Image (spheres, helix red, strand yellow):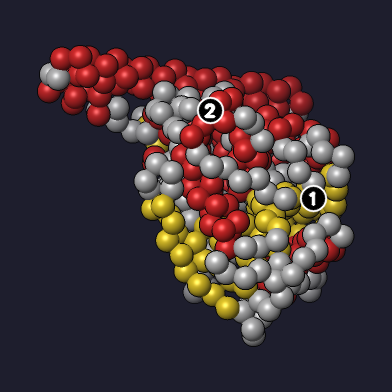
Amino acid sequence: MTTTSLGAGRHQAPASLPERTRTSAHQLTTHDGATVHGLLRTVPGAATVAFLMHPRQDFSHHVLVPELLRHGFAVWTQGARSTGNDLTLLHEQALLDMAAGHVFLRRYGFGHVVAVGHSGGAALAAFYLQQAALPPAARLDSTPGGKLVPLPETELPMADGLIMMAPHPGQGALLQRVIDPSVIDETDPLSADPELDPYHPDNGFAAPPGSSSYPPEFVERYRRAQRDRIARIDAVARERVDTANRARRRYAAGKEAHDRREALATGVITVHRTDADLRAVDLGLDPNDRPYGSLFGRRPDLTNYGITGFGRLTTPEAWLSTWSANTARADLAACAPGVTVPSLLIELTGDQACFPADAKRFAELLPHPDVTHLRVPGRHFGAPLRDGMPSGATLAGDEMAHWAAERFEGTAPVPR
């Protein structure tokens, strides 16, 4: 019997590193005392370093690493304190992690630092650049849930440029697109309102491999219901955070043990069924060259009911910082107007998370006079659009090299 992975073909295996690549591992301490790690890969003559980071994923062996090295970049891949752990991910803290990397690279001596954001890394990079461009006193000093974050006191070196590949709108905005609004009982992963069920034939769903076709009225009602479900979870998260904050203040005043326990007992939020973007199965909605299926696999009507998905398990504080479309600040459309450096946006034509209208809107929101928007064939994770074609990562790397060569010159850095 042959078994086929539901996610087969989603990812592109990285190419081999250039022969003369030199790799070093570094441990950094953030302004607030956290420890983060990064890998610096250099090739002879590299004067510009590409900074790759994602708030949730390990980018150590990202598909762009060998492509950028091949074109003469040095590449820094950094982990966040929350890598692999959605449970406690606070994007405001991730900025402190990113700041430590930028400080390190500036002290190392590179002539130019270019922030490279892929997927959710794009919103993180834009959020960082937005905050770095502000006077320290104007920067955020807390999360949406009220946790203090010392961005005003943190050194935030500015990058010289921003490159985005397949940028989705940010974790919160993305979750609102993919969450299943037919869930009627948040404690029951099988509960469903049949009138909102995206995988019910009566609503326009067709069994794969054929494309579904949802009526405009259903699409409008569905997306409104997605917003409503996010708002309901917001209310739960806000109530729990507020209760904990009140208990924390009582404990500070009276040192009562039960107040301390209540301050810690926020619990976790479980979010069922987050693989339900109608565009994954209806290729006529916001059309591009994407294949049938979602970021998580070829059968979202099945993976929607599994354990895979965005924001599935999170603290109330992390929900408000990362997963709520209403309160998360790492939102690309909101942060782009604050990006003050030359920018390149590379749209992959077969993307399942950044659609043509998204890419156009993000590019138009960037205020710098030097903004370039290019389209190359490929899929979200850098795989080829179709068998036999160059990978999206290779084509994107070529465009990144051309763009950078026209803007950044200099000699190889000397370590200090």
Kind of residue at badge 1 = Leu
Q: Residue at x 76, y 26 (%)?
A: 216
Check whether the beta carbons of the residues at disc 1 and disc 2 lie within 8 A of each other: no
Element assignment for label 1: strand
- Residue that lies at the very extreme toward the bottom in this rendered image: 19
Between 206 and 150, the one lying in front of the other is 150
Q: Residue at x 24, y 28 (%)?
A: 265
Counting from the top left corner in percent of width and height, residue 126 is at: 66, 40
- Residue that lies at the very extreme toward the left in this rendered image: 257
Q: Which mark is residue 148?
A: none
For mark 2, does the 10 Å Cα neighbourhood hold few (<14), some (14 to 19), or many (20 or more) residues? Answer: some
- Is 206 situated above or below 400? above
Counting from the top left corner in percent of width and height, residue 394 is at: 75, 68
**CA–CA distance in space, label 1 to label 2:** 26 Å
Counting from the top left corner in percent of width and height, residue 247 is at: 25, 17
Kind of residue at badge 2 = Leu
The residue that disc 1 covers is 344
Q: Which quadrant of the structure image shows residue 366?
A: top right
Quadrant location of the C terminus?
A: bottom right
The residue that disc 2 covers is 140
- Is 110 situated above or below 132? below
For mark 1, does the 10 Å Cα neighbourhood hold few (<14), some (14 to 19), or many (20 or more) residues? Answer: many
Q: Residue at x 22, y 22 (%)?
A: 262
- Is 296 situated above or below 382? above
Q: Residue at x 65, y 45 (%)?
A: 158
